[in-house]
Image (tube, rainbow, N blue to C red):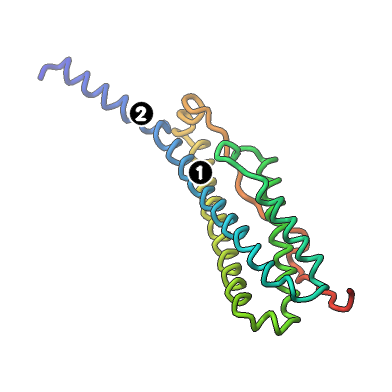
Amino acid sequence: MNLKNIVRAVMVAAASLSLAACGINSVPAAEEEAKAKWADVEAQFQRRANLIPNLVEVAQGAAENERAILTEVTEARARATGINISAEDLDDPAKMEEFAAAQNQLGAGLGRLLASFEAYPQIQSNQNYLALQSQLEGTENRIAVAIGDYNEAVRKYNTTIRTFPDTIGANIIHGAEPLVPYTATTDGAEEAPQIDMTSN
């Protein structure tokens, strides 16, 4: 091997290392990870939306007082399932906020509905209701975990595109934009829902 080949091999190796260190692969990998985690979030919200009609069906005959809550939950479900966020929208704060608001409204309605059932022993003793309540509680936990995983993937992606040397590839080659973490804030979430059982 002559000197010219050795120099060429060293240059190719150096170029490969510099490209690898500039976010050529790490930026798309981090972005795809965040998109996959978002798909998990959507799957859990869909699971919750699928359980709601069954819960409403079990609750239909419970009490006239719950009619307004049932209607609210049904309407909130329709709004929440009508707003979709694609992987391309993950960098749009307005769309993410609209999606989170619809999901928060649905979650709040479900909370009021489940809390109102505490006053009805005949509902609590219904095995279908107990099974649905357990599934909804499990789904809420899965949603929380999926959101946490998504936000961690977004944090890693946003950090990757902002730190040297990955920022070179992120900005020059990929034109990367920061992704928006999911923020679920519900007004008054720190207070338990108040149920008025005296009105008709």
Label 2 neighbour load within 10 Å: few <14, some 14-19, many 20+: few
Viewer-proximal residue among 57 and 51: 57
Return the residue found at the far left: 1
The 10 Å Cα crowd at callout 1, few under 14, some 14 to 19, many 20 or more, is many
Q: Horizontally, is 97 left or right of 5 in the view?
A: right
Three-letter code, disc 2:
Ser
Q: Which residue is drawn at 54% across and 48% down?
A: 38
Residue 94 screen position, x and y as percent: 70, 40
Position of residue 161 measured from the top left corner of the image (x, y, whole percent): 51, 36
Give residue 72's position: percent from left, percent from top. Answer: 77, 60
Nearer to us: label 1 or label 2: 1
Mark 1 = which residue? 35
Secondary structure under tag 2 reads helix
Label annotation for residue 145? none
How far from the left and from the top, in percent, is residue 132? 60, 71
Q: Is residue 181 above or below residue 178?
A: below
Quadrant in which the N terminus appears: top left
Residue type beneath disc 1: Lys
Cα distance between the residues tagged 1 and 2: 27 Å
Residue at 84%, 77% (x, y): give it. 197
Residue contact between numbered discs 1 and 2, judged by CB atoms under 8 Å: no
Dot 2 corresponds to which residue? 18
